[in-house]
Image (spheres, helix red, strand yellow):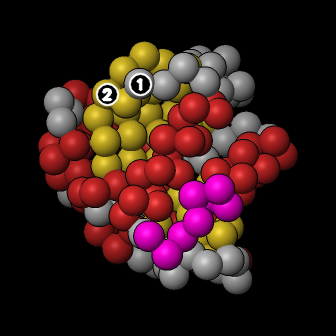
Amino acid sequence: MPSMNDILTPARTACQVPGVSKKRLFETIARIICDDQPSLDYEQVFAQLTAREKLGSTGLGQGIAIPHCRVEECPQPLGTLLTLEQPIDFDAPDDQPVDLLFALLVPGEANQQHLDILAGLARLFHQPDFCRQLRAAQDATSLFKVATQYDM
């Protein structure tokens, strides 16, 4: 399974992102990913994130969400880590608004790898110390550093 360093880059890490809705947040995530990966189409990334979310909320609970989708042109698994300026409603199972997100894009054919990465991320985000440190990060550099100190 890829490590956090394989999936996440400093350019796809952002702190205190303004977000007023899932739609606006998915627009931001698509923009961050496409700015870093110009071969990907913004509209397709946004559409795939939105379509996956319509199948069911990717909110895990405890203020955490892991939006994810497959994108045919995605070269390898790509992650985006965000903390939000203000928590937003994400239809999470515990009804808690979300302030910590890890968005994951995988290639269209990455079936088992996709599931393995999601399982690793879920385990990681269920560690209270990990989440506490991410939420305490004051800038993207610190956020990236914390995220890459842990194994999935």
Does residue 139 show up? yes
The image quadrant where one finds the C terminus is: bottom left
Disc marking residue 18: 1
Residue ID for mark 2: 16
Specify the quadrant of the image occupied by residue 94. top right
Q: Are marks 1 and 2 in contact (CB under 8 Å)?
A: yes
User: Please, what is the three-letter code of the amino acid marked with disc 2?
Assistant: Gln
Residue at the location (65% across, 56% down)? 43
Label 1 vs label 2: CA separation?
6 Å
Image location (x, y in percent) of residue 27? 56, 42
Residue at the location (31% across, 42% down)? 14
Mark closer to the observer (1, 2): 1
User: Please, what is the three-letter code of the amino acid marked with disc 1?
Assistant: Pro
Magenta extent:
38-45
Specify the quadrant of the image occupied by residue 93. top right
For disc 2, the neighbor class at 10 Å (few under 14, some 14 to 19, many from 20) is some
